[in-house]
Amino acid sequence: MSLELFSLAGKTALVTGSARGLGFAIARGLGKAGARIILNGTDAGRTAAAAETLVAEGLDASPLAFNVVDDAAVLAAFAALDAEGRTVDILVNNAGIQFRKPMLELDPADWRRVVDTNLTSAFLIGREAARRMIARGTGGKIINIGSLMSEVARPTVAPYTAAKGGIKLLTRSMASEWAEHGIQSNAIGPGYMATDMNEALMNDPKFDSFVKGRTPTRRWGRPDELVGAAVFLASSASDYVNGQIIYVDGGMLAVL
């Protein structure tokens, strides 16, 4: 089998929430596999700086700052890409936030903020990307970022858990409606990753011990360890894979 099957040369990938963290690592990995990268974030300066970092590494990267939960902003962003003649062949719905509070103390506004960012944004952006992939007749790849919480729950993260569970079935809904158009919609479920968002948990001895004790690999994951799954799902190597979620979790979900 030729490794060309995994090449992303000639493809353009939009990765949401990619100015840092998991999204940045995935964007860099797709770029190294040959894709042109469109980085997204809400902070225009940070997003531009992230793109400059990738360009300095010899990758083809550009920023596109917009709010992924604002329907009008999403439509405007895709209209701008259309006007520039830029097509999105690969979409990675990575944008996400976390908020920890017991449900009995949870304000509905915080529930909506987490669910909108982690789940509704994937619908909004996935819809616009798929609309164009179908119109072009060339298919495409949609990769949604789920979580361990797509399968299991922990106290104090109910909106995140609900949203990531929703990502799993949104992915299957996308597959059910768009597979006939040559679009493969799949997801990646990261385990506990060493990111800025998890820094407080990593610095908490009790939680750090829980993660390392519960994970067969006995360590936190690295953001770049998502790249292999992302490149596979973004490439023609996965052309008959649809509606699936690949867990990159060090084996946590495999054991009791």
Image: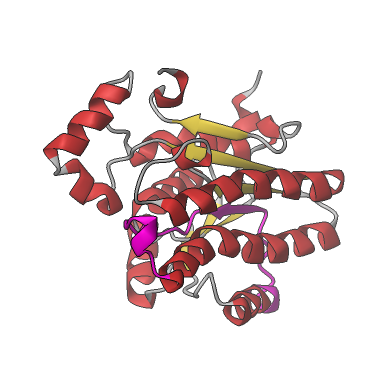
The front one of 60 and 223 is 223
The reply to whether residue 173 is in sight is yes
The front one of 3 and 105 is 105
Quarter of the image that includes the N terminus:
top right
Identify the main secondary structure in magenta: loop
226 vs 76: above or below:
above
The front one of 46 and 8 is 46
Q: Residue at x 55, y 32 (%)?
A: 246
Figure coloring: secondary structure
User: x%, y% of residue 91?
Assistant: 61, 54
213 vs 29: above or below:
above
The reply to whether residue 40 is in sight is no
Question: For residue 52, which quarter of the picture?
Answer: bottom left
User: x%, y% of residue 149?
Assistant: 46, 41
Residue lying furthest front in this view?
104
Q: Residue at x 32, y 56 (%)?
A: 100
Does residue 158 appear to the left or right of 229 in the view shown? left
Say whether residue 96 is magenta.
Answer: yes
User: x%, y% of residue 190?
Assistant: 44, 38
Does residue 146 appear to the left or right of 110 in the view shown? right
User: x%, y% of residue 11?
Assistant: 64, 51
| The residue stretch that appears in magenta | 81-107
Q: Residue at x 39, y 53 (%)?
A: 24
The front one of 101 and 217 is 101
Quarter of the image that includes the C terminus:
top left
Say whether residue 121 is magenta.
Answer: no
Q: Residue at x 60, y 50 (%)?
A: 166
193 vs 167: above or below:
above
